[in-house]
């Protein structure tokens, strides 16, 4: 049976994390109770932690963060037949209405009634996974096969973002791909493109060490270090974007698909310029909500600008890829988790680390993971 109360990490304000005890909700017939064992910290978690908001989404009540999680089933509701206590699962934390036309079409990730754990968009907020146990619908808990670890289970969530982006891009095998941003999502977009589409990948970032990390660990074939410039006028911004696109052009021909994972205006502009006629620009990064884009450079060459928001119908495929030896096909995945913390009490230190470029030993900070 589920415990009556569990410890939870709760955000009360910017950088104000408190360890509290809260009751678990009742276990309904279609629910399962999960002991959370591994959780990766995401960029959106970090925004909430630092600012008590994520863009224009304000936190309106104490919020538990965390949504990249895996755990072990401790109990199941009376109607659950696909899971049993002891099963290891990856948690798909979004809970759509399952009735609207988007849900019926399979696009449940953009359901207007979506309740996504650790997001403050819905009210009341859907509490995240940085707590000892959670009660969650069984249909959104995906069993991990033997050989896929709980840490891998926590990586399924960001991998699903990358796979969903690739599925929406519909690139041909052997495509030329550009990725802006060598953080976790950018690296995984590069990895999934290489493994699934046999793509040739160029990755671009302002940090030389991140670019080198991507190349040395097999995530990308070539790299571009984006100059640290802050152009002021629209004309200066577009000129800079063209400059970056030309730097990409020195590494490869115009690209079939560009994955923009930074949310930075100049990167999205450069992605448009770097795309080949008929190419795709995947808008993944969440940055400034209002940006100036060279639309004519896209429209007269039929470059498609495609939004990507989270994922839908991607978890099972990602788990299949992991079970099928994804790590052996791309050994660099073994180095994606760069810092690990143990225990619920370590969560504040984990967030402090996630906001850094390097740790005290000079190692890059890419993905910080909390084991419990």
Image (tube, rainbow, N blue to C red):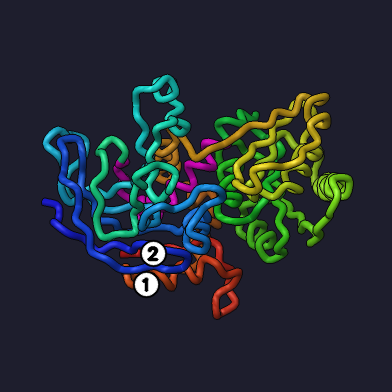
- Residue identifier under label 2: 370
Q: In the image, what residue occupies the spot 41% across and 52% down?
A: 60
Q: In the image, what residue occupies the spot 13% across and 56% down?
A: 4
Q: Is residue 129 in view?
A: yes
Q: Is residue 118 left or right of residue 222?
A: left
Check disc 1 and report its element: helix, strand or loop: helix
The percent coordinates of residue 171 (x first, y second) are 64, 30
Q: Is residue 86 in view?
A: no
The C terminus sits in image quarter: bottom left
* Highlighted magenta segment, given as a residue range: 141-165
Which residue ends up furthest to the front in the rendered image? 60
Residue 47 to residue 273: above or below: below
Q: Is residue 243 left or right of residue 100?
A: right
Magenta portion: prevailing SS class:
helix
- Residue identifier under label 1: 346
The percent coordinates of residue 280 (x first, y second) are 69, 32
**In this view of the protein, which residue sits in the foreground, 98 or 201?**
98
- Count the numbered circles shown: 2
Instruction: Estimate the spatial distance between the alpha carbons at disc 2 and disc 1, rounded to whole Å.
Output: 8 Å
**In this view of the protein, which residue sits in the foreground, 81 or 343?**
343
Residue 260 is labelled as none
Residue 154 to residue 164: above or below: below
Circle 2 crowding by C-alpha within 10 Å: few under 14, some 14–19, many from 20: many
**In this view of the protein, which residue sits in the foreground, 64 or 244?**
64
Please check the rendered image and state whether residue 167 is part of the magenta-colored stretch, yes or no. no
Task: Answer with mark 2 or mark 1, whichever residue precedes in sequence.
Answer: 1
Please check the rendered image and state whether residue 159 is part of the magenta-colored stretch, yes or no. yes
The percent coordinates of residue 182 (x first, y second) are 64, 55
**In this view of the protein, which residue sits in the foreground, 257 or 351?**
351
Q: Is residue 26 left or right of residue 9?
A: left
Q: Are the residues tagged 2 and 1 within 8 Å (C-beta)?
A: yes
């Amino acid at each position: 049976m589920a415990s009556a109360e569990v410890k939870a990490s709760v955000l009360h304000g910017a950088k104000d994390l408190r360890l509290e005890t809260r009751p678990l909700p009742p276990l309904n017939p279609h629910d399962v109770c999960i002991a959370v064992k591994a959780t990766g910290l995401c960029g959106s978690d970090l925004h909430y932690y630092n600012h008590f908001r994520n863009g224009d989404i304000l936190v309106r009540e104490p919020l538990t963060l965390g949504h990249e999680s895996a755990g072990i089933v401790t109990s199941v509701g009376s109607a659950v037949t696909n899971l049993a206590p002891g099963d290891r699962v990856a948690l798909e934390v979004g809970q759509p209405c399952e009735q609207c036309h988007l849900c019926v079409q399979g696009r449940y990730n953009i359901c207007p009634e979506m309740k996504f754990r650790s997001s403050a968009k819905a009210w009341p907020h859907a509490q995240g996974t940085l707590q000892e146990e959670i009660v969650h619908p069984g249909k959104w808990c995906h069993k991990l096969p033997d050989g896929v670890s709980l840490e891998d289970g926590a990586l399924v969530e960001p991998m699903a973002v990358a796979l969903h982006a690739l599925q929406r891009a519909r690139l041909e095998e052997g495509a030329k791909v550009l990725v802006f941003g060598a953080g976790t999502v950018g690296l995984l977009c590069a990895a999934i493109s290489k493994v699934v589409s046999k793509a040739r990948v160029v990755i671009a970032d302002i940090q030389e060490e991140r670019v080198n990390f991507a190349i040395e660990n097999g995530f990308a074939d070539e790299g571009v270090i984006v100059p640290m410039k802050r152009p002021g006028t629209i004309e200066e911004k577009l000129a800079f974007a063209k400059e970056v696109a030309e730097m990409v052009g020195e590494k490869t021909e115009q690209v079939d698909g560009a994955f923009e994972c930074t949310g930075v205006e100049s990167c999205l502009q450069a992605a448009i310029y770097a795309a080949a006629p008929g190419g795709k620009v995947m808008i993944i990064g969440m940055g400034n909500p209002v940006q100036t884009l060279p639309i004519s450079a896209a429209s007269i060459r039929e470059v498609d600008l495609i939004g990507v928001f989270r994922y839908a119908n991607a978890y099972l495929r990602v788990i299949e890829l992991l079970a099928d030896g994804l790590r052996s096909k791309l050994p660099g995945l073994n180095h994606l988790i760069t810092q690990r913390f143990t225990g619920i009490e370590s969560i504040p230190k984990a967030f402090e680390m996630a906001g850094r470029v390097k740790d005290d030993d000079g190692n890059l900070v890419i993905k910080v993971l909390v084991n419990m």
